[in-house]
Amino acid sequence: MAEILAENLSGKAVMGSDGKELGMLYNITMDAKSGRLEHLVVEPDEMLRDSDFPTDERGRLLVPVPRVQAVKDHMIVDR
């Protein structure tokens, strides 16, 4: 995957590979020791009823970075 600046991802819509809108990118977490990106933190869409992703204490989805398939107009993640 080509390098993309994090500032270009802010507020980007996140969609599942099944075509379901998951929500909007809120933040990205990383391991401070290794510098490896860990999760996309996604503010869930109001219409999202079921998700196989864990959530944080505020109900935001934690999508593992390796599940990202594409970044264009939307971020596409494997579901």
Image (cartoon, rainbow, N blue to C red):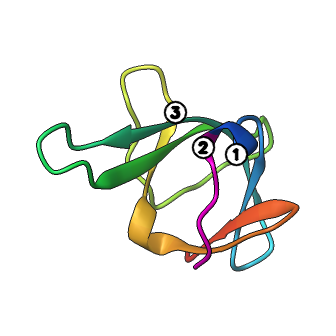
Amino acid type at mark 2: Ala
Q: Secondary structure at mark 1?
A: loop
- In the picture, measured across the screen, residue 63 lies left or right of residue 78, that is left
Q: Which residue is mark 1?
A: 9
Mark 3 or mark 2, whichever is nearer to me? 2
Residue 31 on image: x %, y %: 21, 43
Q: Main secondary structure of the magenta part?
A: loop
Query: Is residue 4 found inside the magenta-colored segment of the image?
Result: yes
Count neighbours of disc 1 (C-alpha within 10 A) and say few if under 14, some if 14 to 19, many if 20 or more: some
Residue 72 on image: x %, y %: 81, 67
Q: Nearer the viewer, residue 2 or 30?
A: 2
Residue sitting farthest toward the top: 58
- Mark sitting earlier along the chain (1/3): 1
- In the picture, measured across the screen, residue 26 lies left or right of residue 41, that is right
Amino acid type at mark 1: Leu
Do the residues bearing badges 1 and 2 touch, measured as CB atoms within 8 Å? yes
Amino acid type at mark 3: Arg
Which residue is depicted at the point 72% across and 79% down?
Answer: 18
Mark 1 vs mark 2, CA separation in Å: 5 Å
Count neighbours of disc 2 (C-alpha within 10 A) and say few if under 14, some if 14 to 19, many if 20 or more: few
Q: Determine which of the numbered discs, if any, sits on residue 60 in the image.
A: 3
Q: Secondary structure at mark 2?
A: helix
What is the magenta range?
A: 1-6
Query: Is residue 13 found inside the magenta-colored segment of the image?
Result: no
Q: Which residue is mark 2?
A: 6
